[in-house]
Image (cartoon, helix red, strand yellow):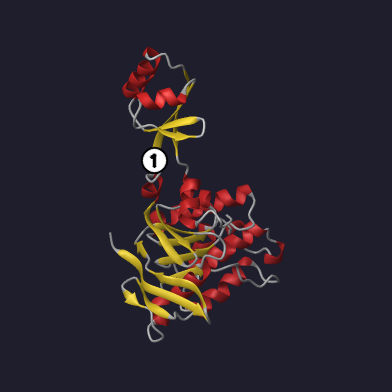
Amino acid sequence: METCVITTGLCKRYGSETCVDRLSLQVPEGAVYGFLGPNGAGKTTTLKMLLGLVHPSEGSVRLMGHELTPRTRLAVLKEVGSLIESPSYYGHLTARENLEIVRRLRGLPGEKIDEALRTVRLDGQARKPVSHFSLGMKQRLGIAAALVGRPRLLLLDEPTNGLDPSGIQEMRELIRSLPSRFGMTVIVSSHLLGEIDQMADHVGVIRRGRLVYQGTMSGLHGMSAARLALRTQDNARARSLLPSARSDGEWLMLDAMSDSEAARISLKLAEAGVGLVRMEQRETSLEDIFLRLTGTEETL
């Protein structure tokens, strides 16, 4: 699989404060890449550096095989769309008129407006003033502006912020569909683990400007270690019978095992006269993994 975005040792400092610290991202082409981390972790600053809106203190950015420099920026960014922080629009103009401004600035043919409106399902509201739009419709208009010209790379910064459940579901479905419909690579940032889990197939987790995990979502799920938890009438006696057991309060913890192995343990305890009160399988939740990666002192 080709790599659409590569950053190498990317840093951004403001005075003595380091906002992004030696970040090395690798975003596969055609992926929905979730850029996940608590608020203030450096996600928006990173996306702005990918767009050349913020100049890196150190490091480099390569987009679609081309290094992003002041000389190449305009040519490279012709194939990039973005929605950073919040959508920009003229409220007194209609959705179509707002997109017409974008089309003219980018020198694109008129049919690109209709395609973008259809993609975000605003074609039925194209002649309505944007000041009358709901927040979800404004977010979709912002994405439509980013999609005009069908870019190869789309950067979305917290696109579900402030949306109701219905709007979140619509946004999620739209983002998931873009790679298969248009061959786009999408980077979507969020502090919401559940959202990234339902949208992305690759993920980078950032904490205080540093990348603490990068890989597939299935790989992140794979970090959850299954365990067998036992509670008996005599844990001390049970532990002497099960040398690999570890105490955890009122519970004894064992590594995950097959049903037949669990049955043998149950029989062994019964034969020794140790009453088994409860036996259950536990897995570390995805949220627990996220908290461990980002630090439990940070709020989600």
Residue drawn at x 48%, y 30% is 251
Occupied quadrant, residue 92:
bottom right
Out of 232 and 219, give the one closest to the viewer: 232
Residue depicted at x 48% and y 60%: 188
The relative height of residue 83 versus residue 176 in the rendered view (above or below) is below
Mark 1 residue crowding within 10 angstroms, few (<14) / some (14–19) / many (20+): few
Seen as rendered, the residue at the extreme bottom is: 71
Image quadrant in which the C terminus is located: bottom right
* Label 1: which secondary element: loop
Q: Quadrant of residue 266?
A: top left
Instruction: Please state which of residues 79 and 215 is positioned toward the viewer in this rendering.
Output: 215
Q: What is the number of callouts on the image?
A: 1
Residue 93 is situated, as x and y percent measured from the top left of the image, at 67, 71
Position of the N terminus, as image quadrant, is bottom left
Q: What amino acid is labelled 1 in the image?
A: Ala
In the foreground, 215 or 136: 215
168 relative to 155, above or below: above
Q: Residue at x 43, y 75 (%)?
A: 11
Query: Can residue 41 be seen from the camera position used here?
Result: yes
Relative height, residue 73 to residue 177 (above, below): below
Residue 148 showing in the rendered view: no
Estimate the x, y position of residue 173 in percent, counting from the top left.
50, 50
Label 1: which residue? Answer: 225
Measured as percent of width and height from the top left, residue 69 is found at: 38, 83
- Residue 78 percent across, percent down from the top left: 42, 76
